[in-house]
Amino acid sequence: MLLRFTKMHGLGNDFMVLDLVSQHAHIQPKNAKQWGDRFTGVGFDQLLLVEPPSNPDVDFRYRIFNSDGSEVEQCGNGARCFARFVLDKRLTAKKQIRVETKGGIIELNVRNDGQITVDMGPPRLVPEQIPFQADAQALSYPVEVDGQTLELAAISMGNPHAVLRVNNTETADVHGLGPKLEHHPRFPQKVNVGFLQVIDRQRGKLRVWERGAGETQACGTGACAAAVAAISQGWMDSPVQLELPGGKLLIEWAGPGQPVMMTGPAVRVYEGQVRL
């Protein structure tokens, strides 16, 4: 059978989006891996599935597969593309959309200027909720990698993140430390790794190594985690503007227990069909 799909991106973080509300198919991890190959498939960072909700209090179910076939809990840039997609495809007329994900319920707000604000919910900072192995909750943790001790924040935005402060994102060892931290035994479900450079109280630069995908042009949940780490440790003040290789995101957070609000663009690239 042929399935219609849309290729989209949020700040260069790119997605293949499938409507499984009006189309009916059973998507397996092997499909995501096949389609995700940039040489022999469609090519993407993540595959996004738009499904009918299983919860009557939400509008849609949102599932996410990395290009290696692994399913993940959350994707912030993908959430913005999700909102743009369901409006463009007339699957809803709402500008405020509630969506269930593997990481919890999120709320999407499509603004009149075309930017999309996502209520990502409160960050989870308790180690076992991230999950991260630590004796007690702290603002930062020492982690041993190849004989050196790194100081990092550990945060969940529905998916696990480690945030390291660096002097310069351009010279940061993203491709060396990224995969080593991704698979570090203290992160039992692996981890996304953010390398944050603080420019001033409200501006920073960020590169993210995503588990199962490698370095991406942008990572929405990574930007949220980096902002939470920076605000918690007194490096920056909300709202925080973070510049990623693919563009800028605005992150707002009022403090512990409060939701993280992320605002940025979502762009449709092209329509296509794949054979299942």
Image (cartoon, grey):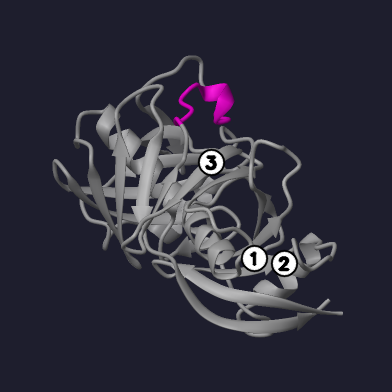
SS category of the residue bearing label 1 = loop
User: Residue flagged by tag 1: what amino acid is it?
Assistant: Ser
Q: Residue at x 57, y 36 (%)?
A: 187
Asked where in the image residue 16 lies, by quadrant, the reply is: bottom right
Up the image or down, 47 lies above or below 194; here it is below
* Residue 67: assigned label: 1
Residue 176's disc number: none
Mark 3 = which residue?
106
| Circle 3: residue type | Ile
Q: Give the residues drawn in magenta, as a range.
A: 122-132
202 displayed left or right of 70: left
Q: Nearer the viewer, mark 3 or mark 1?
A: 3
172 in relation to 217, above or below: above
Residue occupying the far top of the picture: 136
Q: Are marks 2 and 1 in contact (CB under 8 Å)?
A: yes
Position of 146 relative to 128 (above/below): below
Magenta region includes residue 229: no
Q: Secondary structure at mark 3?
A: strand
Say if the magenta span includes residue 131.
yes
Task: Of the two numbered discs 3 and 1 on the same chain, state the one appearing first in sequence.
Answer: 1
Badge 2 is on which residue? 32
Front one among 117 and 174: 117
Give the alpha-carbon distance from disc 2 to disc 1, as whole Å.
6 Å
